[in-house]
Image: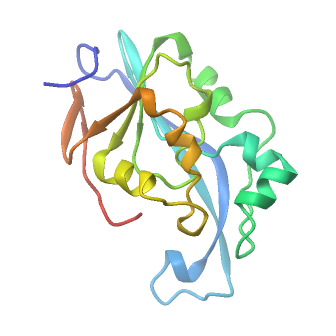
Amino acid sequence: DAPLPLTGLPRALHAFVVGYEPISEAISLRDGDPARFLLEPVTAAAVEYADGWVLLDGGFNLDVVRSPELRARHLNYDSYTPVVPPGDPLRDAVARAGLRWSDLACCAISHAHLDHTGAVPTLPPEVPVLVQRREWAWVEGGAGHREVVLPGDLVDAAARVRLVDGDAPLAPGLTALATHGHT
């Protein structure tokens, strides 16, 4: 049984680009040039139902990206510089899709890297956050700067984190797939 109180099949999938990351080509492509960088999109998505929607990932924590002090503390390695458009790209994309935050049923996080967890601190407190049990254990076990994680994005939301084990149905027509290995 799916844990989310959504009915029927999804009506729409809304894909959002919420920022960009300059990533070494050697990380993204086999035999890529380590001196060449690609500007890769950071994405999130919304799965819309008649009676609510699910946010899949949440981009960057804008408070960290836009604060010189926090940025220096958390993002100062290997020339890493997240790029985000003005405003709040996730909230702006959600508004353009015609979705209301009051209808958000949950946020599902694919993995704990900082380009996926940033929206969690800004979500309404009643919105559950779904995380794979292995990812949660990894973050709680001390993942941080070296692993490209902002642990507080998830740990500070611990009271509303719901753990998922492997492949699991979330709502009709929406299934979490375990894709261990990226983190």
Q: Nearer the viewer, residue 112 or 40?
A: 112
Left/right of residue 89 with respect to residue 48 in the rendered view: right
**Quadrant hosting residue 78:** bottom right
* Residue 98 seen in this snapshot: yes
As drawn, which residue projects farthest toward the right? 68
Residue at horizontal 75%, vertical 49%?
A: 65
**Quadrant hosting residue 94:** top right
Residue 51, placed above or below residue 74: above
| Coordinates of residue 156 in the picture (x, y in percent) | 55, 36
Looking at the rendered image, the quarter that the C terminus falls into is bottom left
Left/right of residue 135 with respect to residue 30 in the rendered view: left
Looking at the rendered image, the quarter that the N terminus falls into is top left
- Looking at the rendered structure, the number of numbered marks drawn on it comes to 0
Residue at horizontal 63%, vertical 33%?
A: 90
| Coordinates of residue 75 in the picture (x, y in percent) | 71, 61
Q: How is the image coloured?
A: rainbow
Residue at horizontal 34%, vertical 20%?
A: 11
Residue 89, placed above or below residue 4: below
